[in-house]
Amino acid sequence: MDAGNHDVKNVPTSESLAGYEKIFGPDRYTFSHGSVTGIVLNSSVIHSPQEAPEQLAQQERWLRAELTKAKAAGARHIVVFQHHPWFLASAAEPDQYFNIPLARRAPYLALFREFGVRYLFCGHYHRNAEARDGELQNITSGPVGKPLGGAKSGLRVAIVRDDVIEHRYYDLGDQPSTVVLTAAPDKK
């Protein structure tokens, strides 16, 4: 779970962040499974840090330390998860309600590239969007509830392979009853 704007307010405060942590636990954390290290960020403080600048600074220090540890441990995939998308169509797109403002987006994207992050999984947009900036993929998944703009409720399935993470969004009416994990196709 990550802290979204409806959990900690559109402009989070020390009080709203403390309330979230009291109920749900840390608003940022790291997990590892096999060759994957997942880093979950509180993107609300990145998006709108006006009332929580110290929390933003703490999270930035923590993020760099976690990326350093993941890279030193030899994680094959370092994946970042957060509520707000970094971008929807282009890393240089203008600021809007649904993306991280460019003034903060650009330095984070540079940090992700520095540490070999290739996948950014996000929500907030209430529909699907996928965009690339070089090797960096920003994958925004639509919601289970309250889709907007003609989107349908659904969920995304990701399959981790040695060299890639494959993912697909399934509308609830189209989701398979099972997902068969087969060997990756031969690359010739």
Image (cartoon, helix red, strand yellow):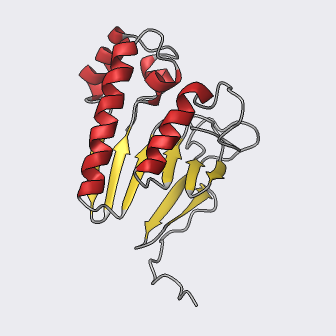
Position of residue 98 relative to residue 137, above or below, is above
Horizontal arrangement in the rendering, residue 118 relative to residue 13 (left or right):
right
Q: Residue at x 49, y 81 (%)?
A: 184
The residue furthest right is 150
- The answer to whether one can see residue 91 in this image is yes
On the rendered image, what quadrant is the N terminus found in?
top left
State the image coordinates of residue 78 (x, y, percent, origin top left): 38, 54
State the image coordinates of residue 164 (x, y, percent, origin top left): 48, 68
Horizontal arrangement in the rendering, residue 108 relative to residue 65 (left or right):
right
Position of residue 41 relative to residue 16, above or below, is below
Please count the marks in the image: 0
Q: Residue at x 53, y 85 (%)?
A: 185
Q: Quadrant of residue 188?
A: bottom right
State the image coordinates of residue 120 (x, y, percent, origin top left): 50, 48
Position of residue 35 relative to residue 10, above or below, is below
Front one among 117 and 170: 117
- The answer to whether one can see residue 27 in this image is no
Front one among 100 and 135: 135
Q: Quadrant of residue 147?
A: top right
Q: Residue at x 63, y 53 (%)?
A: 132
State the image coordinates of residue 145 (x, y, percent, origin top left): 57, 38
